[in-house]
Amino acid sequence: MRIDIITVLPEMLETFFEYSILKRAQEKGLAEIVVHNLRDYTTNKHRKVDDYPFGGEAGMVMTIQPIDACISALKKERDYDEVIFTSPDGETFDQPMANQLSLLENVIILCGHYKGIDWRVREHLVTKEISIGDYVLTGGELPAAVIADAMVRLIPGVIGDEQSALSDSFQDNLLAPPVYSRPAEYKGWRVPDILLSGHEAKIAEWRYDQALERTRRLRPDLLEKK
């Protein structure tokens, strides 16, 4: 998988992808994440990528020219399955969407900024708009990092134990059950006996019951999707 991220703050993202699982995925050749500075594509002599909105509304708007130039340059090199725009009014990002996106070959993520983006970008250049929640951030860099992380970790071979990703919260519209590690007792706090029993079927049943109970208590809305 190749992910091209377009941003006005490349330094904010470049270091994020140099650590942990995302770094190992790239070293294994399972993922390639390339960050592009939008200012490199503007024809403005001052490298500006924003301007005042028509109609006199407050704030600045990302202009269409550098965005079109960057996306067009990338598309000359390869075909893209999706051109994603990070926006608070996009479709809410969730685990099923991450699963779907992880199967793609090439993806562009365009980070929003300022007051907004020239609407013609959304009408003619973007294929999918994604929000990571009902709140507004100063820019789309954090959402882009979240989306890329959630996608890449699902690629086969990225995580050593692939079953681990399949048992994460939200994979079956259930929250994950509690997990424990050594020691079995600490300050009088004991690990549930069932997990020490070695009985795989009963442990699986316990985990499912725990996941169901936690979901009913904390996120009952997820059960409506089952």
Image: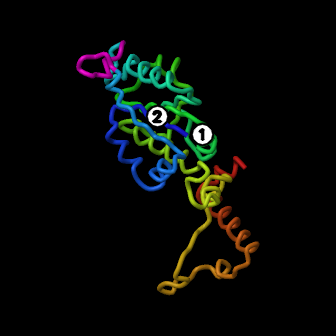
Residue stretch in magenta: 42-54
Quadrant holding the N terminus: top right
Horizontally, residue 79 falls left or right of residue 49, namely right
The residue beneath circle 1 is 101
Which label belongs to residue 4? 2
- Counting every numbered tag in the picture gives 2
Horizontally, residue 82 falls left or right of residue 206, namely left
Which amino acid, mark 2? Asp
Give yes or no for contact between labels 2 and 1 (Cβ–Cβ under 8 Å): no
**Main SS category, magenta section:** loop
Q: Furthest-right residue in view?
A: 201
Q: Position of residue 124 (x, y in %)?
A: 52, 17
Identify the residue shown where x is 48% and y is 41%: 32
Neighbour class for label 1 at 10 Å: few (<14), some, many (≥20)?
many
Q: Nearer the viewer, residue 92 or 64?
A: 64
Relative to 36, does residue 159 appear above or below in the rendering? below
Q: Between marks 2 and 1, how big is the CA–CA gap?
A: 14 Å
Q: Nearer the viewer, residue 54 or 101?
A: 101
Relative to 117, does residue 176 appear above or below in the rendering? below
Q: Is residue 47 magenta?
A: yes
For label 2, the SS is strand
Which amino acid, mark 1? Leu
Q: Position of residue 217 (x, y in %)?
A: 61, 60
Q: Position of residue 20 (x, y in %)?
A: 44, 56
Identify the residue shown where x is 53% and y is 27%: 78
Q: Is residue 91 magenta?
A: no
Q: Position of residue 2 (x, y in %)?
A: 52, 37
Neighbour class for label 2 at 10 Å: few (<14), some, many (≥20)?
many
Identify the residue shown where x is 31% and y is 16%: 43
Write down the quadrant of residue 161 in the picture.
Answer: bottom right
